[in-house]
Image (tube, rainbow, N blue to C red):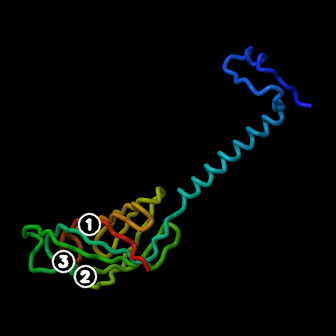
Amino acid sequence: MPTTWSNAQFEQYPGSQPISPGSPIPSAREQMMRRLVLALVVLGAAAISAQAQDATPDLKGTWSGKGKALVFGTNPHHPGSQTATDSPRVRDIEATYTVEGQDGRLAWGRSASTAADTKEPFAWAIASDNKTIVGADMDGYFRITLVGPDRMEKCYTHNGTSPSRSVVATCYMMDRVKR
């Protein structure tokens, strides 16, 4: 039978709380079991949280966005008669990226813009933070930040050694197209 304490006995222990008269005191085994259950609950919650953070994002699907690009020269997505030695232009761009496949942290697909349906191939690699993506296409490079499961900030550059000899820099938001 569990031991019972009176409220007067609690006065001996500073900071202790009185209990109702006749309340049983948990045994050492009961106290240890309570602590064990609490520890298991905390560990389980931490493991679920860590697993959710470690999941590689699924990028498959179509991503679309509009933004501004700074352009020296011309290329299929930024047509004109300017050369790379002319003053730069600020141009509107609307692009679509279709991620056709993904194997773990590697994704690939094809891109196009409203100015040129080039279906240009691209390759992306997802960093271990599951938010940063780097990649390349036929003439430039990507730095992408995932800001949500269906939203990314895509930055793209290419330099004058690209096949078009143009120089481009842009960053804008892209959203996954809902099916």
Query: Which secondary structure, mark 1?
Result: strand
Q: Nearer the viewer, mark 3 or mark 1?
A: 3
Q: CB of mark 3 within 8 Å of CB of mark 1?
A: no
Please name the amino acid that badge 2 sits on. Answer: Thr
Please name the amino acid that badge 3 sits on. Answer: His
Query: What is the number of the mark on residue 78?
Result: 3
Query: What is the number of the mark on residue 40?
Result: none
Q: Earlier in the sequence, mark 3 or mark 1?
A: 3
Report which residue position mark 2 lands on: 114
Q: Position of residue 15 (x, y in %)?
A: 66, 20
Report which residue position mark 1 lands on: 157
Query: Which secondary structure, mark 2?
Result: loop
On screen, residue 89 versus residue 111, left or right, reads left
Question: Distance between the Cα atoms at labels 3 and 1?
Answer: 13 Å
Please name the amino acid that badge 1 sits on. Answer: Thr
Question: Distance between the Cα atoms at labels 1 and 2?
Answer: 18 Å
Q: Position of residue 106 (x, y in %)?
A: 47, 69
On screen, residue 23 versus residue 173, left or right, reads right
- The residue depicted at 12 percent of the width and 69 percent of the height is 89
Residue at the farthest bottom position: 117
Q: Nearer the viewer, mark 1 or mark 2?
A: 2
Q: Earlier in the sequence, mark 3 or mark 2?
A: 3
